[in-house]
Amino acid sequence: MKIEVRKPTEEELKKLGVESWPTWTCPVSEFDWTYDEAETCYFYEGKVIVETDEGNVEIGKGDLVTFPKGLKCRWKVLEPVRKVYSFG
């Protein structure tokens, strides 16, 4: 299961409607997580390393990320996170 990370354009963010997505924040921490459904999120702030069986993925400010349904991973939050997200 692959995590997709990319830098979107402002136009793409507007099309997706990220400004209306709910906000999630997290302090520096580590935790295990399983995605019960696919999630797309946009990072306004922060830096994390997400560890999976297929390797580590670094995510930070300005990244648009898609996590696949069923992914089991460990989040290592290196800098406090503020992101918006959408399921499905």
Image: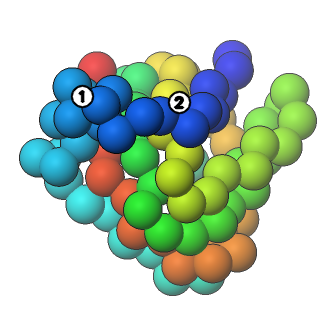
Tell me, yes or no, if residue 35 can be seen here: no
Q: How is the image coloured?
A: rainbow
User: Where residue 57 sits: x, y (%)?
Assistant: 77, 43
Q: Is residue 23 above or below residue 17?
A: below
| Residue at 25% over, 60% down | 23
Quadrant position of the N terminus in the picture: top right
| Residue linked to disc 2 | 67
Q: Amino acid at mark 2?
A: Phe
User: Where residue 37 sits: x, y (%)?
Assistant: 38, 25
Query: Mark 2: few, some, or many residues within 10 Å (few <14, many ≥20)?
Result: many
| Residue at 46% over, 55% down | 43
User: Which residue is most to the right?
Assistant: 55
Q: Is residue 76 above or below residue 10?
A: below
User: Where residue 72 sits: x, y (%)?
Assistant: 64, 35
Q: Is residue 38 left or right of residue 16?
A: right
Marks 2 and 1, the one that precedes in the sequence: 1
**Residue 36 image label:** none
| Residue linked to disc 1 | 16
Q: Is residue 7 above or below residue 79?
A: above
Tell me, yes or no, if residue 55 can be seen here: yes
Secondary element type, mark 1: helix
Q: Amino acid at mark 1?
A: Leu
| Residue at 64% over, 66% down | 47
Q: Quadrant of residue 41?
A: top left
User: Where residue 46 sits: x, y (%)?
Assistant: 56, 70
| Residue at 65% over, 28% down | 3
